[in-house]
């Protein structure tokens, strides 16, 4: 199944510092190189959907491309932030890179190329189409079971039984399916339908998920459950 490389970016003229920033989400996993913290992965990183980023883009990768990109990105985790650089993994010693350097390297790895800078935040707007990206996070490109794989900020109020927030419900259902390998014991080994309907089946799976993580199991996704859903990898 195809996977998404999603980009979140804020341009230099939109930041008080005059320095833009970019991060990505690859197959649902966040990657970011941040000043003072270095190359980050997962919940430690701000992904494409983070509210900092005013512009979002995506590109569809094959499984092989996504695998190569992920392997490269994972090897960068822990390297320092280095302004104006692209991470270097070989030959040793390894060297870190800046935000657009990390994302450039991930893109190069997906294409089977040596890691070089492909863009900066200042020129992204003029070149994203040449790099194979289109605007938006692109969640509709994958099949229903993969909707909402990217991290998502807490909406501010709990999402529960018969919620009208269909998009959030689809995200919750997709995350729960991913966490369980599409097999929920409370549903007889079957997956949840990713249909946006927060009915009794979704509630039952949420309760089981909450109890596995030491929560009371009230069946609604509030501020304690949401970070656990975001942490699913």
Image (cartoon, rainbow, N blue to C red):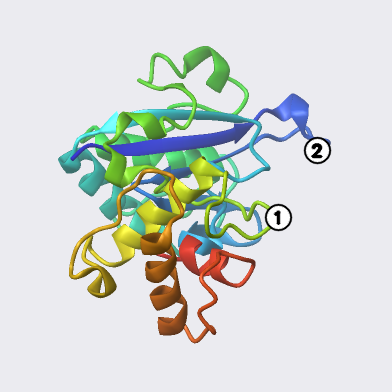
Give the side of residue 94 with respect to residue 7, left or right.
left
- Residue drawn at point x = 37 percent, y = 68 percent: 205
Element at label 2: loop
- Residue drawn at point x = 56 percent, y = 17 percent: 125
Residue 34 got which mark? none
Residue 156 got which mark? 1
Q: Could you classify mark 2 by the number of other residues whose Cα lies within 10 Å: few (under 14), some (14-19), or many (20 or more)?
A: few
Give the side of residue 29 with respect to residue 43, left or right.
left
Find out whether the residues at labels 1 and 2 contact each other: C-beta distance under 8 Å: no
Which quadrant holds the N terminus?
top left
Q: Nearer the viewer, residue 98 or 129?
A: 129
- Number of numbered callouts drawn: 2
Task: Residue 33: give x, y in percent of width and height.
Answer: 54, 51
Residue furthest toward the right? 16
Element at label 1: loop
The answer to whether one can see residue 86 in this image is no
Q: Could you classify mark 1 by the number of other residues whose Cα lies within 10 Å: few (under 14), some (14-19), or many (20 or more)?
A: few
Asked which quadrant contains residue 123, the reply is: top right
Rendered position, 161 above or below 140: below
Task: Residue 216: give x, y in percent of width and height.
Answer: 54, 84
Task: Residue 149: give x, y in percent of width and height.
Answer: 39, 48
Rendered position, 132 above or below 9: above
Asked which quadrant contains residue 108, the reply is: top left
Which quadrant holds the C terminus?
bottom left
Residue located beneath label 2 in the image: 17
């Amino acid at each position: 199944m195809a996977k998404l490389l999603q980009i979140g970016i804020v341009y230099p003229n939109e930041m008080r510092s005059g320095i833009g920033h970019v991060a990505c989400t690859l197959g649902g996993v966040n990657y970011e190189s941040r000043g003072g913290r270095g190359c980050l992965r997962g919940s430690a990183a701000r992904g494409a959907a983070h509210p900092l980023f005013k512009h979002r883009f995506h590109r569809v990768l094959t499984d092989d491309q996504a695998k190569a990109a992920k392997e490269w990105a994972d090897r960068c985790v822990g390297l320092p932030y280095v302004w104006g650089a692209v991470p270097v993994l070989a030959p040793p010693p390894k060297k870190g890179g800046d935000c657009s350097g990390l994302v450039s390297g991930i893109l190069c790895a997906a294409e089977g190329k040596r890691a070089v800078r492909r863009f900066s935040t200042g020129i992204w707007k003029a070149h994203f189409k040449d790099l194979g990206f289109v605007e938006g996070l692109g969640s509709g490109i994958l099949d229903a079971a993969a909707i909402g794989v990217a991290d998502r900020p807490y909406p501010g109020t709990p999402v529960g039984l018969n919620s009208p927030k269909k998009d959030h419900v689809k995200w919750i259902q997709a995350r729960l399916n991913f966490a369980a390998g599409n097999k929920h014991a409370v549903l007889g080994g079957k997956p949840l339908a990713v249909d946006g309907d927060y009915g009794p089946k979704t509630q039952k799976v949420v309760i089981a998920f909450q109890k596995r993580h030491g929560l009371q199991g009230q069946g609604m996704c509030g501020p304690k459950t949401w970070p656990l859903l975001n942490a699913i990898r």
